Image (tube, rainbow, N blue to C red):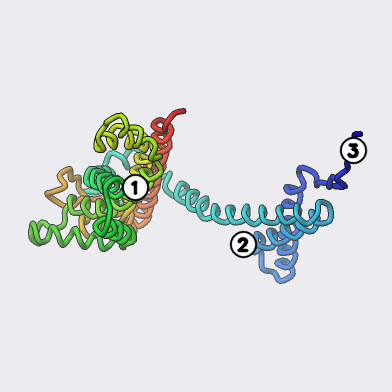
């Protein structure tokens, strides 16, 4: 005998597909109308955008929850409410990012011409000039810092994951954590003091000192990124290699590192993007100059962050020209960081394990 059982669960109704968009438009329209009305009543002019946004979001959350609760039920209404809060938080986080990007592009694009990339600031006190010396200095010091910190960081991470046991490994981990959180000016003071002892006061400020300060900041980031990537490599891969009679060092070189290469390379690129915008340590250790300098051991070197700072702080006869160059330098630095992040994505895609 076959019995048909009914669960007694009734299919719940659902709101239209575009209800959320409609409720959002209605909420912000009501908020704009309220502030426009009160602004005209009190003769205050245009409504405050922040106040309109907050009131519009509050109205949207209320309309969304109440309508969903009455039509779809409590669980669906709660889900819509949480989704609205999360979406609102993301939108709030994007506002300063979009505003910053728009401001830098708007103010820096006018001076981003051929002269800016081909000239220096030597003997320039008004319009004209460029940031070629700062761009060269930024790329050179970042490359030197990368060559110093990447081998040290990768070797340290390999030691911590593959060999480190006991108090020494704990001490290394502790100092890496401490270095990750030190203020950047401390790294600049360290590099300046080091070269002050080695070369004396006359040659203590140079490009190499700036590169050392950047390497101090970059090394713990590389260690952390590499360490986390090595930790997620399955032990089965190592054990399979050992079972074939391959020694540990060769297993690390041939199995572990190639598997984690995508994440390691991405971490290195991100660490470069983290140090390339540093100002305080370079201002102290590398100084600033208006001339081109290719030798990091001989004289002071200019970098883009310091170029932006000095253009604002030390202005010449034409103030607006210095301000325009500062915005153009900031835009150039932003473009470099965006390119580095794009390279990190490409490397992650190309070197990630297949299959």
Between disc 2 and disc 1, whose residue precedes?
2
- Give the distance between the C-alpha atoms of the residues marked 1 and 3, in whole angstroms: 59 Å
Q: Nearer the viewer, residue 166 or 295?
A: 166
| Disc 3 crowd, CA 10 A, few/some/many (<14, 14-19, 20+) | few
Q: Which quadrant would the N terminus be assigned to in this image? A: top right
Q: Does residue 310 sit above or below 3 in this rendering?
A: below
> Could you tell me how far apart the alpha carbons at marks 2 and 3 are, in whole angstroms?
58 Å
Is residue 120 something that shows in the picture?
Answer: no
Task: Specify the quadrant of the image occupied by residue 310.
Answer: bottom left
Given residues 1 and 301, the one toward you in this image is 1
Depth check, front residue: 292 or 212: 212
Secondary structure of residue under mark 3: loop
Q: Position of residue 140 (x, y in %)?
A: 23, 43
Residues tagged 2 and 1 counted as in contact (Cβ below 8 A)? no
Could you say which is closer to the camera, residue 253 or residue 321? 253
Q: Of marks 1 and 3, which one's residue comes earlier in the chain?
A: 3
Task: Count neighbours of disc 1 (C-alpha within 10 A) and say few if under 14, some if 14 to 19, many if 20 or more.
Answer: many
Left or right: 104 in relation to 206: right
Within the image, what quadrant is residue 353 found in? top left
Q: Residue at x 30, y 60 (%)?
A: 174
Q: Position of residue 102 (x, y in %)?
A: 50, 49
Q: Position of residue 299 (x, y in %)?
A: 14, 51
- Say what secondary structure mark 1 lies in: helix
Tag shown at residue 227: 1
What residue is rendered at 83% in x and 47% in y? 12
Q: Nearer the viewer, mark 2 or mark 3?
A: 3
User: Which residue does the numbered mark 2 point to in the structure image?
Assistant: 50
Say which mark, if any, is on residue 4: 3
Q: How many marks?
A: 3
């Amino acid at each position: 005998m076959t019995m048909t059982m009914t669960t007694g669960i009734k299919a719940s109704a659902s709101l239209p597909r575009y209800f959320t968009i409609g409720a959002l438009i209605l909420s912000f329209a009501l908020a704009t109308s309220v502030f426009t009305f009160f602004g005209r009543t009190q003769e205050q002019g245009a409504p405050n955008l922040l106040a309109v946004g907050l009131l519009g979001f509050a109205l949207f959350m209320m309309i969304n929850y109440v309508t969903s609760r009455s039509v779809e039920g409590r669980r669906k209404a709660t889900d819509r409410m949480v989704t609205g809060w999360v979406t609102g938080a993301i939108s709030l986080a994007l506002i300063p990012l979009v505003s910053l990007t728009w401001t830098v592009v708007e103010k820096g694009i006018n001076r981003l011409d051929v002269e800016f990339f081909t000239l220096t600031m030597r003997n320039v006190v008004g319009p004209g000039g460029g940031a070629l010396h700062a761009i060269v200095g930024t790329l050179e010091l970042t490359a030197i810092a990368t060559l110093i910190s990447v081998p040290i960081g990768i070797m340290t991470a390999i030691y911590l994951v593959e060999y480190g046991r006991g108090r020494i490994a704990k001490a290394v981990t502790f100092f890496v954590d401490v270095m990750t959180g030190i203020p950047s000016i401390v790294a600049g003071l360290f590099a300046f003091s080091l070269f002050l002892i080695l070369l004396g006061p006359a040659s203590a400020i140079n490009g190499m000192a700036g590169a050392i300060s950047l390497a101090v900041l970059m090394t713990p980031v590389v260690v952390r990124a590499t360490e986390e990537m090595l930790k997620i490599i399955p032990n089965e891969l190592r054990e399979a290699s050992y079972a074939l009679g391959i020694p540990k060092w060769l297993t690390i070189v041939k199995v572990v590192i190639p598997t984690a290469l995508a994440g390691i390379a991405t971490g290195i690129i991100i660490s470069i993007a983290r140090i390339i915008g540093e100002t305080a340590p370079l201002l102290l250790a590398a100084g600033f100059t208006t001339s081109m300098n290719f030798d990091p051991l001989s004289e002071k070197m200019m970098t883009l962050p310091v170029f932006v700072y000095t253009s604002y702080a030390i202005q010449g006869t034409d103030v607006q020209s210095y301000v325009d160059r500062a915005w153009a330098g900031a835009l150039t630095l932003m473009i470099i960081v965006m390119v580095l992040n794009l390279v990190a994505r490409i490397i992650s895609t190309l070197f990630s394990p297949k299959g």
